[in-house]
Amino acid sequence: NVEIIISGGSLISASAINRTIPKDLVFSVGSIDFGTGTLNVSGTVTGSDITGNATISDNTTLLIGNGTSGNTNAQTIAGNLTLNKLTIDKRNGTNAVDSTVTLGNILAFTANGTINVSHGILDFNAPGALAGSLSSLNLTIGSNGVLKTGGTTLTGITGTINTASGKIVFDGSEIETMPAWALSELEIDNSAGVVTSTGTMNVSQSLIMTNGIITTTATKILQLGTAATVQ
């Protein structure tokens, strides 16, 4: 196992290359650039600091999970980090806990960034987990992907939204506003409740009312598909 520490410098490859860090990435100040390659971290990403210019290059994808050959345990992105592309692929997790990637602080996305939750659970864990250029941030949640808000606002994400096959859990502690997106599954686990934003949120498969209420209006609509169930 290897722990990589980046402090005050840069780790750069001149061409596209994929690299795996089999343990932890401790990222204080500096940058990582593997061109259009992928940086796969099997452990925890910690210690980074947005104000200290700790970044992963816009061209490089930060991959947490690494699919069927990846880490079977829960993982954490514990520090602040500036990046452009994040992919969660925890298909090797054997249960919900082991399939979860939890944010411990802030991810700041540069312009035209992407979040792709293909397999597993991305848990924002607290309000304010996202920063940066959210108006151009693109979000994809696959059929095996789950996004838990932790109270982080999603309505500011206005890039390309591909969430119709995925699931979102609104589990903050204050009233949350749900964007007018299409989902396969929607779970409400917020005792303060949620409100719909202007437009229509479409849920095709299931609405899970774990805790809390949903407030809609004539112009702020929650629409269930013909095959959808309510639990």
Image: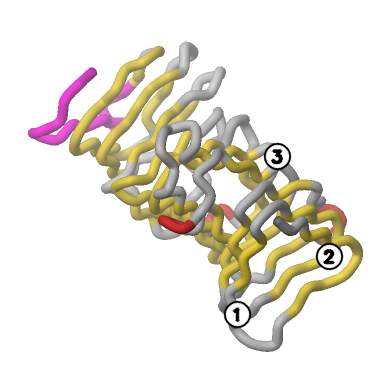
Query: Gap between marks 1 and 2, in whole Å?
Result: 19 Å
Residue at x 35%, y 19% (from the top left corner)? 215
Residue 197 horizontal/vertical position (percent): 39, 34
Residue extending farthest to the left is 226
Badge nearest the viewer, 1 or 2: 1
Instruction: Give the residue at mark 1.
Output: 17
> Which label was assigned to residue 30?
2
Residue 126 visible in the picture: yes
Q: Which residues are magenta?
A: 216-231
Badge nearest the viewer, 3 or 1: 1
Tell me the kind of residue under disc 3: Asn
Which comes before the other along the chain, label 3 or label 1? 1
Residue 158 visible in the picture: no
Callout 3 secondary element: loop
Query: Gap between marks 3 and 1, in whole Å?
Result: 28 Å
Which comes before the other along the chain, label 1 or label 2? 1
Which comes before the other along the chain, label 3 or label 2? 2
